[in-house]
Image (cartoon, rainbow, N blue to C red):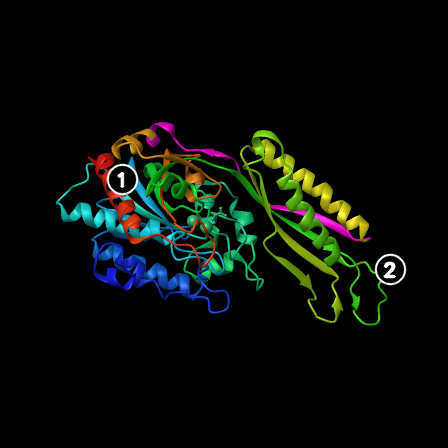
Amino acid sequence: MTLTEVAHGTLAGLAEINGTGRDASRGGYSRHIWQPAELELREWFIERAVRLGLDVETDRNGNIWAWWGAPGSNAVVTGSHLDSVPGGGAYDGPLGVISALDAIARLQSTGFTPRRPCAILVFAEEEGSRFGVACLGSRLLTGAISPERARGLTDGDGIRFDAAAAGAGLDPAHIGRDSEALERIGLFIELHVEQGRGLIDLGEPVAVASSILAHGRWQLRFTGEGNHAGATPMDGRRDPMIAAARATVAIRDAARAREGSYAQGSRATVGRIDAIPGGTNVIASTVTATLDVRAETDEETRALVSDIEALAADAATKENCAVLVTEESWSSVVHLDPELRSQVASTLGGIPTLSTGAGHDAGVLASVVPSAMLFVRNPTGISHSPDEFAELDDCLAGVTALESVLRELLQ
Ligand code: HGY
Ligand code: MN
Ligand code: MN
């Protein structure tokens, strides 16, 4: 079945938002916090939740809560995010939100009444695509980032987070750890499209998550001497683009060269390089490269980053440039709650367990409440790309799994 064919069944939500935030130049979707496409998705979610009779509120940090019955403590909370990476896929985030809506709709349609509070939670800025810090909404909720630091984050146009939050109707003075909201959460479970090949290799539609790689984001800022591309001889140039290019290849080689048990899980990626001033006929004065590093332990990730810092310094020196490395965000390795994981697995008759290299809000919440994740097979094994995909039958298997787990946890 195509997406439009499901317009009236479970996962109809995928069809309903299929056109929202399409990115004509990159392909896929660009849905960034408090910009038109993401605002449209917020409204879509609220309308869908109200249609289910859920009580909706947006918290002080821009996360949306949709309560099935009265808010209360020890709640079973499920959900994910609606925002995307630039040119992202249709499923990363929205599949978890839509599956939560559909699982609750199915429970309601069987006359099931939850014996404990239940809510869907839609997190703000999970991808960090606008303000640079991943899982910003869940970090603020849990106090994993200071309100001061969050307020001062800026987007590509220099707009501050506090100004954007105020524009979205929040009180920037009030953002930060929300103990009252946290105390309500008894456990959190997030359904998410798988972003690797695990379920393809296992030949299974659904798995439960075991762990999330340690990961973080850094910025490498190379500075040299801006000059005229035509009037400046090659000798004597101090070109930060060359330093950044050398460093980018060396970073890739360093991650590939990790030894022993860390070889498989170590990853380092330069996702974007921005040059100032960025003219075709101009030698750049400053070049900024983004850096994403991940590994199976905090120590190994930190060790790889310090190797990368040395490599970047060497690349800069060779070009008579300077480099400044600054950390933007950090997430320790996450081992999701083993008890909840086995309860989920046994409820589902023993589905496989998978670790992931992708970060999630469930990984942030795991530091404060028992958290679990369900993965749905992605037959391309590709994510953060328009090629990300999930077969309808596998999506339905995911909803059915989430419905069974919620029924078990709520009775
Ligand atoms: O970057 C990540 O792993 C997640 O998609 N935010
Ligand atoms: Mn993502
Ligand atoms: Mn995601």
* Residues shaded magenta: 320-341
The residue at the far left in this view is 111
- Which circle, 2 or 1, is nearer the viewer? 2
Q: Nearer the viewer, residue 167 or 54?
A: 54
Q: Determine the image quadrant of residue 142.
A: top left
The secondary structure type at the circle numbered 1 is: loop
In the picture, the quarter occupied by the N terminus is bottom left
Q: Position of residue 30 (x, y in %)?
A: 46, 62
Check the image and report above or below for 38 versus 140: below
Q: Is residue 46 left or right of residue 87?
A: left
Marking on residue 72: 1
Check the image and report above or below for 100 versus 160: above
Q: Determine the image quadrant of residue 169.
A: bottom left
Q: Amino acid at mark 1?
A: Gly
Q: Position of residue 280 (x, y in %)?
A: 71, 70
Instruction: Judge the density around disc 2: few (<14), some (14-19), many (≥20) Cα neighbours within 10 Å.
Output: few
Q: Which residue is mark 2?
A: 236
The secondary structure type at the circle numbered 2 is: loop
